[in-house]
Image (cartoon, rainbow, N blue to C red):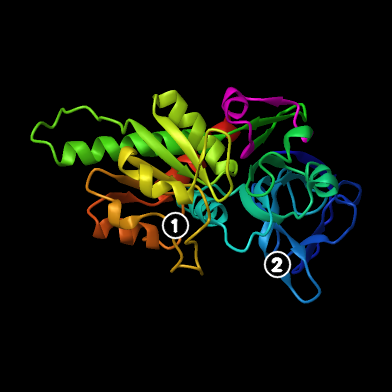
Amino acid sequence: MARIEQRLKFVDDLAPVVANQGYFGKAGWAFYTPRRFNVDDTIHVKRRGRKQVTSRPIGLLKIHGKGQFNAAITFMVMTRYGLIGHPLTHSFSQTYFTEKFAREGITNARYDLFDMPDVQTALPILFKLPGLRGLNVTIPHKTNVLPFLDRLDASAEKVGAVNVIRIEADGTRTGFNSDYYGFRQSLTNWVSGSIRQHSDEPGTLSILPANALILGTGGAAKAVVAALNDLGIEHKMVSRMSLPNGLTYADLPNVIADYQLVVNCSPVGTFPNTTAAPDLPYNQLTAQHWLYDLVYNPAETELMRRGKQQGAAVMNGYQMLVLQAEKAWEIWQE
């Protein structure tokens, strides 16, 4: 963590500690404690509002030296992570990482939402945030952030979109794509687990579907395409509009029997529009079909419910989210 050395004098029962004014731009960062500081104390520093100190810390104080007056302290800026996108009405990532930090005893980090309609002016300002180590990126900015990065990892180059940014020690920025990893790993886990569950031979290897339909053409679809290419699964993109070498929803009644895997990369069916579902010929689905809906809220989407009625195997996007989140954490800690 970044450190700022500072000399302070402590008062008896109520000790204000104001962070370095030049570093934060204003002297509004303070912490009040109802007791004296002791040597080797570690104290959370919070931002002081008009009425009370807010509940979320922005740093830590480590007390050094001897005695209660003129003790040397180190202000340590918390390691910051967050999600950029728009609109950010609900975030799996913030809930996941906040719970992860609490569960694993990670006290020097926090994860925030940065609702960002436009990256052109807001993102350069965010990159100056003290302690910023990494960002997740969601719609509509998975390609918008590319001009602000210094380099791309092989995963991001393969997908052509970024959903993870790592701030390097020298201040440069590297883009990654953990959606690619999350989808690929979750798909192979799902197929392998399902086949072993229904096989009399526990050691049976997974047999991946031979071909797939991809519903949607956004950033998530790019990661799915890259993963399917690497797995050797042939695929067609499905959209409302005609695409080169693609299909429209009107084409599906004539071809869906030929495609084993259907991946929904569109937001159709996401809460609160839970009764909506992609326009598929559901009556043609069979037990030979695999329906992978990247939507995770609700846990069972209308697409999944209708597919199950036809005997198809179904899965939502929760495992992919967990896998991509842990991959992002791994990237940030490298």
Instruction: Give residue 135's mark.
Output: none
Question: For the C terminus, which image quadrant?
Answer: top right
Q: Picture coordinates of residue 330 (x, y %)? A: 52, 33
In the displayed structure, would residue 272 be above or below residue 230?
below
Query: Label 1 to label 2, Cα distance in Å?
Result: 47 Å
The quadrant where residue 89 appears:
bottom right
Which SS class for mark 1? loop
Q: Is residue 327 visible?
A: no
149 sits to left or right of 121 = left
> What span is colored magenta in the figure?
148-164
Of residue 275 and residue 35, the one placed in the foreground of this image is: 275
Q: Which residue is mark 2?
A: 54
Quarter of the rendering occupied by the N terminus: top right
Residue 279 found in image quarter: bottom left
Answer whether residue 156 is magenta in the image. yes
How many numbered marks appear?
Answer: 2
x, y (%) of residue 103?
45, 52
User: Which mark is drawn over residue 279?
Assistant: 1
Q: Amino acid at mark 1?
A: Asp
Q: Position of residue 21 (x, y in %)?
A: 90, 52
- 243 horizontally vs 114: left or right: left
Amino acid carrying mark 2 in the image: Thr
Q: Can residue 76 be seen here?
A: yes
Horizontally, is 266 left or right of 256 in the view?
Answer: right
Local crowd size for mark 1, using a 10 Å CA cut-off: few (<14), some (14–19), many (≥20): few
Percent across and percent down for residue 115 are: 71, 57
Using the rendered view, name the quadrant where residue 64 is placed: top right
Of the image marks 1 and 2, the number of the one nearer the N terminus:
2
Q: Residue furthest left?
A: 200
Which residue is drawn at the image coordinates 44% and 33% (left, top)?
235
Residue at image position (49%, 61%) is 270
